[in-house]
Image (cartoon, rainbow, N blue to C red):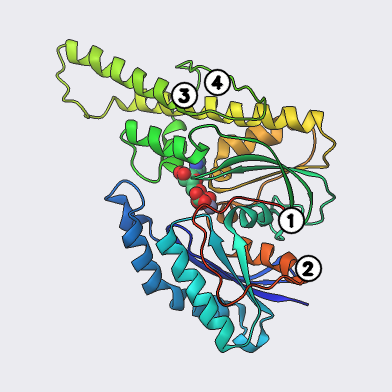
Amino acid sequence: MTLILGIETSCDETAAAVLKDGRFLLSNVVASQIDLHRKYGGVFPEMASRQHVLAIMPVIQQALADAQVGWDDLDAVAVTRGPGLAGSLLVGVNTAKGAAWANQLPLLGINHLEGHIYSNWIEAEGNHPDKVFPILVLIVSGGHTELILMTGHGEYARLGGTIDDAAGEAFDKVARVLGLGYPGGPAIQNAAQNGDDRAFRFPKARTKNPYDFSFSGLKTAVLRTVQRIEGQDLSSSRKLTPGEHLPEQVVADLAASFQRALVDALVEKTVRAAESLEVTEICVCGGVSANAALREAMRARAPIPVSIPPIYLCTDNAAMIAAAGHFRFLRGERAGLDMDVIPNLPLTSH
Ligand code: KG4
Ligand code: ZN
């Protein structure tokens, strides 16, 4: 049996979780900073690190209490070392080091993207924890969009990824253009519920590598459409000042049409890869995999089984870091107490 404490502070969530045997979630505590950053329209890095400093110990103590375990029961501490905001990562990594040293526990440094992938290994609705490699993985988060062929634990072959904006970044930027606020993903999904997803036709990006993605053209097309509509309104009797919100129905239609275009691109390319490669299943992960339209379309159109974690494991959490840590712990990996954070850490095999 293994009991791993996971710690995650790469961006704007302070999180800790205790995971048994790499799949049974005993506790999962997430302190979100969304309210703090909302007034800035995005994550304010210095505020994020200082908030992590305030929250990290209470969050860890809560995770241990919820799991009803003490430090002596743990086998290892797994912490995100990158990619992410340097100041935010430092809080989690230094706390993990102190805890590992004080309690004589092994320390593991985890890649945040690998954590997202391993959210699919946790025993939870929508997941298939018993997997047979190779697996096709789609990571869609605020900073990343990656299509990966996973051939074993820790073995990744990159098929493609975004050549400009990440999927979550596109959601966040378009939400700002539509005056929907932060974070953009849930706001767009919400607005899109009342919209017609065929009201606007947005162009499909062509990429040289068929497994690459490009979302900046789509984002610009939404912006141009908004400017055109606002321009029309300015010339009509109703006077609009720049930046004034569009009529609610137009915002809903734009949100729905944008969401559909983005989801179509993600699903089309993932399905194409699943059809041409010998893979047993598709694993979708990362914050954008919380999107209802994406979840539905992927499940409806995929030719093989699809694993998508429940929403609370899609957005940033520490359970996924503990899950990735479990497999590295079993492989004998250990980090030294001189481990540094790596803000632009790529996902590599080892
Ligand atoms: O994985 P995550 O929590 O943090 C990063 O590692 O980046 O992903 C955050 C991203 C944000 O861009 C957010 O807008 C997006 O995930 N997101 C969504 C939804 N929920 C979160 N995007 C679309 N629909 C959602 N329901
Ligand atoms: Zn993430």
Tag shown at residue 331: 2
Kindly indicate whether the residue at mark 1 contacts the one at mark 2 (C-beta within 8 angstroms): yes
Instruction: Give yes or no for contact between labels 3 and 4 (Cβ–Cβ under 8 Å).
Output: yes
Name the kind of residue labelled 3 in the image: Leu
Left-right relation of 260 to 19: left
Which amino acid does the dot numbered 4 rest on? Ala
Reading the chain from its start, which is encountered first: label 4 or label 2? 4
**Mark 2 / mark 1, whichever is N-terminal:** 1
Q: Secondary structure at mark 1?
A: loop
Q: Secondary structure at mark 2?
A: loop
Along the polypeptide, which appears first: circle 1 or circle 4? 1
Sequence-first disc among 2 and 3: 3
Q: Is residue 273 left or right of residue 241?
A: right
Q: CA distance from mark 4 to mark 2?
A: 41 Å
Examine the image and state in which quarter residue 104 appears. Answer: bottom right
**Distance between the Cα atoms at labels 2 and 1?**
10 Å
Q: Residue furthest front?
A: 338
Percent x, y of residue 170: 45, 35
> Looking at the image, do the residues carrying marks 2 and 3 touch, with CB atoms under 8 Å apart?
no
Q: Which residue is disc 3 drawn over?
A: 218
- Horizontally, residue 284 falls left or right of residue 155, namely left
The residue carrying mark 2 has its beta carbon less than 8 Å from ligand 2: no
Label 4 belongs to which residue? 205
